[in-house]
Image: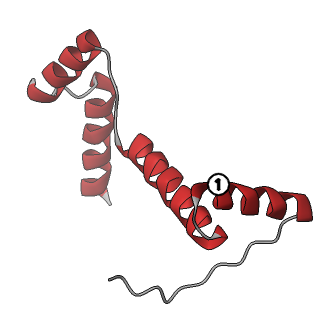
Amino acid sequence: MTVKDQRREVRMSAGDDDLLAEAAGLAGVSVSEFLLDRALSDAAAMVEAHRTIHLAVGDRERFIKALDGPVRPPKELVAQARRARRLKRVG
């Protein structure tokens, strides 16, 4: 069993508190359990959405091909790197 040793406090209006209490009652759980369950579910979904890239099939194939293909840095980046090396040697 997980030890619950952390605490968060939330300020809300009486109407919001009543709504949460009613929803928790309908779910058959305490308000704390209801809030924690919903918050964790939403948090997990948000983190997953930000960690995952969803692409259409064609876009996915192009993305994989680009990752697997040879590295071709932009010409401007190569030129900038050469200029930076020359400046380093001078100084």
Q: Nearer the viewer, residue 53 or 5?
A: 5
Q: Residue at x 32, y 50 (%)?
A: 87
Q: Residue at x 56, y 59 (%)?
A: 39
Q: Residue at x 24, y 55 (%)?
A: 89
Residue type pointed to by label 1: Leu
Q: Is residue 64 above or below residue 42?
A: above
Counting the numbered discs, the total is 1
Q: Is residue 5 above or below residue 83?
A: below
**Res 15 → quadrant:** bottom right
* x and y percentages locating residue 9 in the rendered image: 71, 78
Q: Is residue 76 above or below residue 49?
A: above
Q: Nearer the viewer, residue 5 or 61?
A: 5
- Does dot 1 land on a helix, a strand or a loop? helix
* x and y percentages locating residue 14 in the rendered image: 90, 65
As drawn, is 79 to the left or to the right of 44? Answer: left
Q: Is residue 89 above or below residue 82?
A: below
Q: Nearer the viewer, residue 36 or 23?
A: 23
Q: Residue at x 31, y 15 (%)?
A: 56
As drawn, is 40 to the left or to the right of 77? Answer: right
The residue labelled by disc 1 is 26
* x and y percentages locating residue 12 in the rendered image: 84, 66
* x and y percentages locating residue 1 in the rendered image: 32, 83
Q: Residues within 10 Å of mark 1 (few under 14, many from 20)?
A: few
**Res 33 → quadrant:** bottom right
